[in-house]
Amino acid sequence: MRLAYIRGHVTSTVKHPSFTGCRLLIAQPVDRAGKADGAPQIVIDQHGAGIHEQVIICADGAWARDYLKDQTSPCRWWVMGIVDPERSAAS
């Protein structure tokens, strides 16, 4: 699991069939200080995260393939949850 910020949406005219109906976003992993940490990742989002929102992403490809009901899917990263800015500021 990693913290990340959503930086954009992915638009594609051709994609793997397992991504049909999925919302794909660009997530930039960050360190504890909020600075970019690694390359941006394309993630599946089932929670409705918006641009500039902080999220928790996970690289459990097995879960993603189960969620997509396609064991041949190339998906690896997915949005596990959206960080509540009010709750994280209180910590």
Image (tube, grey):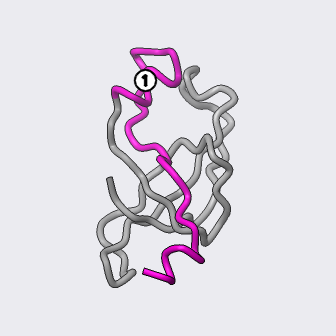
- Please tell me which residue is depicted at 58% across the width and 29% down the height of the picture: 19
Would residue 23 be found to the left or right of residue 27 on screen? right
Residue name at image x 50 percent, y 48 percent: 79
Q: Position of residue 51 (x, y in %)?
A: 65, 66
How many numbered dots are placed on residues in this image?
Answer: 1
Q: Position of residue 66 (x, y in %)?
A: 44, 20
**Amino acid at pointer 1:** Arg
Please tell me in which quadrant of the rendered image residue 7 appears: bottom right
Residue 1 in the figure: left or right of residue 10: left
Q: Is residue 46 above or below residue 81?
A: above
Q: Could you say whether the residue bearing mark 1 is in a helix, strand or loop?
A: helix
Residue range of the region highlighted in magenta in the rendering: 62-91
In percent of width and height, residue 10 lies at: 62, 50
The residue labelled by disc 1 is: 65
Q: Residue at x 42, y 52 (%)?
A: 57
Q: Nearer the viewer, residue 84 or 9?
A: 84
